[in-house]
Image (cartoon, rainbow, N blue to C red):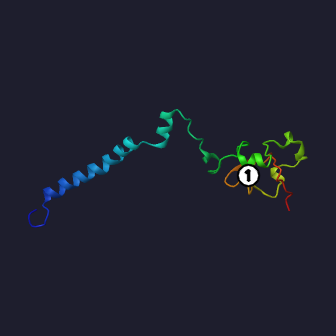
Amino acid sequence: MMNGKMDRRGFFATFVKMAGVAFIAPTVLNTVFGSEAHAQKKRGAAPEAAPAAKGGMPLLDPNDSVAKAVKYVADYKKAPEAKGNHCATCGFYGKKDATTGTCTIFAGKLVLADAWCASWNKKA
């Protein structure tokens, strides 16, 4: 390798070293830095529920600050001010499946079709 050319033995030695680094590096990095799930497990925290079951969006939590602000309830029958109205009959609601849908008020979250909030607006 004196004249800038690599011989066959040098090539294979370099190749084996590079392959070893490429194979071992991810394992070492994962061990050193760990994953978020592993870190949560070590802290004793419960892992977040996977929202993938309903197309990647989580179901709206009634304790959400926006939900509380508009008096969101998961069952319209438990809210006398709903007067029989519910999300499935609201203009802001977009049906996703038989029991859930999207709402422009609660962006990125699914709401129950039988829920209600004070922002209910009759469908046009």
* Mark 1 lies on residue: 101
Q: How many marks?
A: 1
What is the x, y in percent for residue 97?
73, 50
| Amino acid tagged 1 | Gly
| Residue depicted at 22% across the width and 51% down the height | 17
30 lies left or right of 2: right
Q: Nearer the viewer, residue 30 or 43?
A: 43
| Residue depicted at 13% across the width and 56% down the height | 9
Does residue 7 sit above or below 17 in this rendering? below
The N terminus lies in which quarter of the figure?
A: bottom left
Q: Can residue 88 be seen in this view?
A: yes
47 lies left or right of 90: left
What is the x, y in percent for residue 80?
89, 42
Does residue 105 sit above or below 42 in this rendering? below
What is the x, y in percent for residue 47?
55, 38
110 lies left or right of 42: right
